[in-house]
Amino acid sequence: MDGRHLLLLHVLALLLLAVVVAAGGGAVVGRDSAVLQLRELQWGSSGQVRYSQSKRFEKKMTGEHKKAAAAARTRTRSTTVLELKHHSLTAIPDHPAAQETYLRRLLAADEARANSLQLRNKAAFTQSGKKATAAAAAAAGAEVPLTSGIRFQTLNYVTTIALGGGGSSRAGAGNLTVIVDTGSDLTWVQCKPCSVCYAQRDPLFDPSGSASYAAVPCNASACEASLKAATGVPGSCATVGGGGGGGKSERCYYSLAYGDGSFSRGVLATDTVALGGASVDGFVFGCGLSNRGLFGGTAGLMGLGRTELSLVSQTAPRFGGVFSYCLPAATSGDAAGSLSLGGDTSSYRNATPVSYTRMIADPAQPPFYFMNVTGASVGGAAVAAAGLGAANVLLDSGTVITRLAPSVYRAVRAEFARQFGAERYPAAPPFSLLDACYNLTGHDEVKVPLLTLRLEGGADMTVDAAGMLFMARKDGSQVCLAMASLSFEDQTPIIGNYQQKNKRVVYDTVGSRLGFADEDCSYA
């Protein structure tokens, strides 16, 4: 090979490296570590982000992905995409002290959430009697935009649905922003006339404006066994009406309490729900008349758990009991991920193949999705701990920060500190529940060792660089390892949404498997 050929190969190699760096937004140093630009960790921005349904989302899709999505809609509208974003009633404060207080409050809310999962009512698990088929999973679907909820004063992810309509001549279907939660079953929103409600950005849902709205009767199965499986408490009955010549009717009332003190109470009802471009009639949901808790400024919550009243189970005949999401790392601007209902993979933009592990159901904790973690490594170096593989691990979109068993967390923290500390970053004080913090002042980017979880069956999940560090101070003087320890070894480990960013996470309830793939989820 002469000098000209060698020079050509060298130039091609440099061009390839440039393409990789441009595609990833930073230099890739292999799957075990990555160079992270610290500006990617900054929280929020001023200004309001407007919401929209799937038409706006489709404009963001280009090339083969847009063609594939169009082909899917032509077949049977196999996937509807909802945006997933972080939104808030006000922008995150720019003043350092105000921002610190704001983030501490959000992390305290997350701590309450994580603790509540350890104390959940352990009602018997009731699987839906209407088991979906694999054919159904491939035949229908919906894809909905999914975004960060930071401008709704929550670190959870949110999407927009529409409830109501049904040909009413009064107010039509109303758009409602709800938290996407795989750890809950019953979908609920705040409703008029609300006796006790927290402040939300969207208008309250008005049942009187929907001709398709109906209260669930007391003798319906949804009011008894199904509601008890979803909330731990069966419905209660009350007779209403009878005055002014009107007939009396019985209504089923639900009462949903969370371990952190949050609650929603109201009428169990049915109505038409619109998801992206698809609509589902007769959807059972909670019309909340008394609500309090850690829901930010959202209108309520979308339950993606496993019992009969979850959105996944109710739409299984249409979407096949399969859903996936891609959580964007960005918390500002128009960056949006997606929530896909159905088994069609044409809307995925994954950079690596989806690898699957067994989905585990715990009869004592009905809504939850568990998996077995058999090992872990940090920056390619294996970590050993007594807690690895000792218990089921909960995969949860409603928890923000990952909680590990104390022995596992200590091992992960020590190996992370050994590799990250080799770069001579000074230690910084702990921040809230995060106790491994560094002063990165003056650094625009840092090389971050990545955590990889080895899953049962040979699959693995490598945390994206943006999910490894939490920026507590905007100037970089307090940047922390974005993981925390449980109090006891026998508590349930949780993989939170912060560590699921830039991943295609697939929930196949029919095949009883969970899938993971790398994907850039910021479809700006």
Image: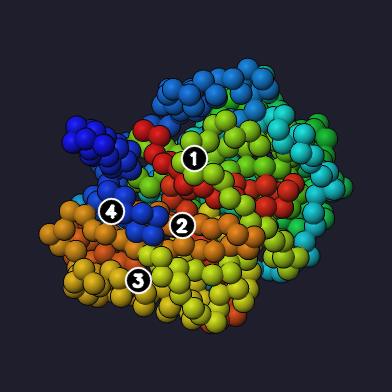
The secondary element bearing badge 3 is classed as helix
> What percent of the width, then of the height, locates residue 99?
25, 58
Gap between marks 1 and 4, in whole Å?
A: 20 Å
Q: Earlier in the sequence, mark 4 or mark 3?
A: 4
Q: Earlier in the sequence, mark 2 or mark 1?
A: 1
Gap between marks 2 and 4, in whole Å?
A: 15 Å
Checking the image for residue 416, the label placed there is: 3
Q: Earlier in the sequence, mark 2 or mark 3?
A: 3
Q: Nearer the viewer, residue 59 or 91?
A: 59
Q: Amino acid at mark 4?
A: Leu
| Residue 110 location, quadrant | bottom left
Q: Nearer the viewer, residue 466 or 304?
A: 466
Gap between marks 2 and 1, in whole Å?
A: 14 Å
Q: Which of the image's four quarters has the N terminus?
A: top left
For the point 55% across and 24% down, which residue is it? 69
Does residue 506 appear left or right of residue 90 in this picture? right
Residue of label 2:
462
Q: How are the colours assigned in the image?
A: rainbow
Task: State whether residue 442 is above or below residue 2.
Answer: below
Q: Amino acid at mark 3?
A: Phe
Residue of label 4:
36
Checking the image for residue 350, the label placed there is: 1
The secondary element bearing badge 4 is classed as strand
